[in-house]
Amino acid sequence: MLALDVETTGTDPETARIVAAAVVAVGGTEPDTTAWLLDPGTEVPAEAAAIHGITTEQAQADGRAPGETLPEIVSALAQALSEGCPLVVFRAPYALTVLARECARHDVPFLDGDVAPVIDPAVLDKQAERYRRGRRTLPALCEHYRVRHDGPNDPVQDALAAARLTWRLPRVHPRFAAIPLVDLHLRQRAWAAEQAAGLQAHLRRTDPAATVTADWPLIPPNLAEQSGV
């Protein structure tokens, strides 16, 4: 599997800029990691820097241009998919949509066709334990499933943690292990839509105008709604 994680300037996938990214190939004796630091060309808001630790000054001093880094990120994903390797992306609609919008912004070709197969531990967890109370962030899920997570909001460590969750979930919930990868992708799409509808109904108890995107694993252009990092 190849796990992807991005750190960004904000929570809206339509406008957020990537400041750091990592892909981690898991399946051999040791994880194979590639990481990027980007200069997004805009200010990194203080609230975002407080989460991932990357300031505007650091991004400008040490980051590479998106036009140079984005093709490398997309190439890594495309290579994995061409080999039948699943992409592991925690909260895929956010991360993949941010990446797709950044590619469009910088005239970099994105992945061709349907982005599949994708495994999203957030969707699997919600489907398996839909009534469990508590937070469902990556650190929270790692704690719940007793999965190692060495550095929240570090893209390498977040990608590794997502990969470990993907390994762990079918062992805690064996029904996932019995589903072929292609079918699992399609089922996650349906599950994500159901989960979004449930969350939207919950939010509309207090905000009648609340909307939650049902698209998975990628939000189509011009339909991006605020998702969350």
Image (spheres, rainbow, N blue to C red):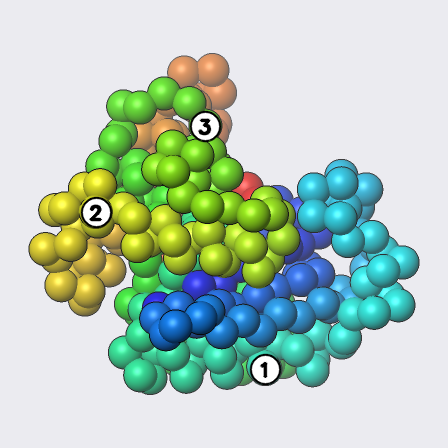
How dense is the environment of label 1, judged by Cα within 10 Å: few (below 14), some, or many (20 and up)?
some
Residue type at mark 1 is: Pro
Element marked by disc 1: helix
Residue that mark 2 sits on:
171
Give the vertical position of 68 relative to 198 (above or below).
below
Identify the mark at residue 71; answer none if there is no mark. 1
How far apart in space, not on screen, are marks 3 and 1 (Cα)?
Answer: 34 Å
Identify the mark at residue 135; answer none if there is no mark. 3
Going from N to C along the chain, the mark reached first, 1 or 2, is 1
Q: Residue at x 13, y 63 (%)?
A: 180
How far apart in space, not on screen, are marks 1 and 2 (Cα)?
Answer: 35 Å
Q: Where the N terminus falls, by quadrant?
A: bottom left
How dense is the environment of label 2, judged by Cα within 10 Å: few (below 14), some, or many (20 and up)?
few
Q: Is residue 11 left or right of residue 24?
A: right
Q: Is residue 65 left or right of residue 98?
A: right
Q: Residue at x 48, y 57 (%)?
A: 160
Q: Residue at x 69, y 80 (%)?
A: 67
Q: Nearer the viewer, residue 2 or 11?
A: 2
Image x and y of residue 226, in percent: 54, 43
Q: Where the C terminus falls, by quadrant?
A: top right
Image x and y of residue 181, in percent: 19, 65
Residue type at mark 3 is: Arg
